[in-house]
Amino acid sequence: MQFGIFSVSDITRDPVSGETPSEAERIDAIVQIAQKTEEVGLDVFAIGEHHNPPFFSSAPTTLLAFIAATTKRLILSTATTLITTNGLGGQAFIARNSQDAKRELRPYFNEAPVYGHGPSLEDFSDLTPLSVGSPAEVIDKTLTFREHFGDYQRQLFLMDHAGLPLKTVLDQLDLLGEEVVPVLRREIAARQDPQAPQAPTHASLVTAKYGDAAPRQPRPHANRGDNVTGASPYHDTDAKYQAEYPDL
């Protein structure tokens, strides 16, 4: 099981301070969040793609490339499969006890663009994967996901939504990495079907495709043309994949 963080890249006014971060501030914050994700021992960081306000991530691959250059082992991904945001990836907010967690998150929840001004925090938590409470409560709720979906491979949490200050998010990641995820790893490993496939990594996908052989390194025929103006320019392209073009 892989554990990680995803962000929808929203720019939301902080309802407590009244301040709205700039796009540059949010981009800087998300880089720090990704770096913290690795620091606390999580596996994955993912971010969505949007081309309209109030979101800042219109070029997630560029942002992820920068994050890749500043981390060492973090698995990076886009995060635009919305069913995971609903069926398994929900916001989590953790405090030492349930009362403090609800008190601290409530003003942000009540003004959040996605679920503010709707069901109460308590009702929304009952109906969705939103987990608000102590580390033990977040652990217990997350473990119920397997009862509905079986042995899935990746659990992502949303931690920076609804205008939460960067410091609050980084503190949340400390709690998640130190007190929640280690327990989830042990509990899920103990309950998982031993035949369940492991979560994919780049190394496992390369091995699945090439086995013990070296991965394909495309080597072009010099001055052969390209895939638009002529046959394939690559040495090792199978003959059945040669380009064919109609007579005009």
Image (cartoon, rainbow, N blue to C red):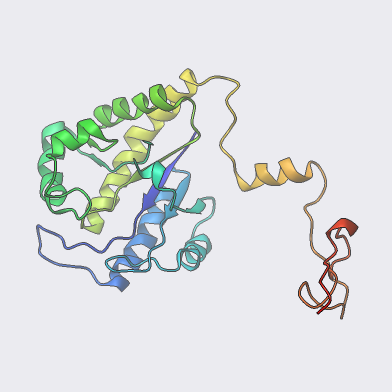
Q: Quadrant of residue 225?
A: bottom right
Q: Quadrant of residue 13?
A: bottom left
Q: Return the x and y of residue 174 as percentages of the image width and height.
A: 31, 44
Count of numbered circles on the image = 0
Q: Return the x and y of residue 40 as percentages of the image width and height.
A: 39, 45
- Residue at 40% x, 42% y is 84
Q: Is residue 31 above or below residue 22?
A: above
Q: Return the x and y of residue 127 as percentages of the image width and height.
A: 23, 32
Residue 204 in view: yes
Residue 40 in view: no
Q: Is residue 29 above or below residue 143?
A: below
Residue 233 appears left or right of 138: right
Task: Quarter of the image for the C terminus: give it.
Answer: bottom right
- Residue at 41% x, 61% y is 49
**Front residue (pair 177, 233):** 233
Q: Is residue 69 above or below residue 118?
A: below
**Front residue (pair 135, 63):** 63
Q: Return the x and y of residue 165 as percentages of the image width and height.
A: 21, 57
Q: Is residue 149 above or below residue 87?
A: above
Residue 196 appears left or right of 12: right
- Residue at 45% x, 68% y is 59
Query: Which residue in the rendered view is the most extreme toward the front?
Result: 248
Q: Quadrant of residue 186?
A: top left
- Residue at 33% x, 69% y is 52
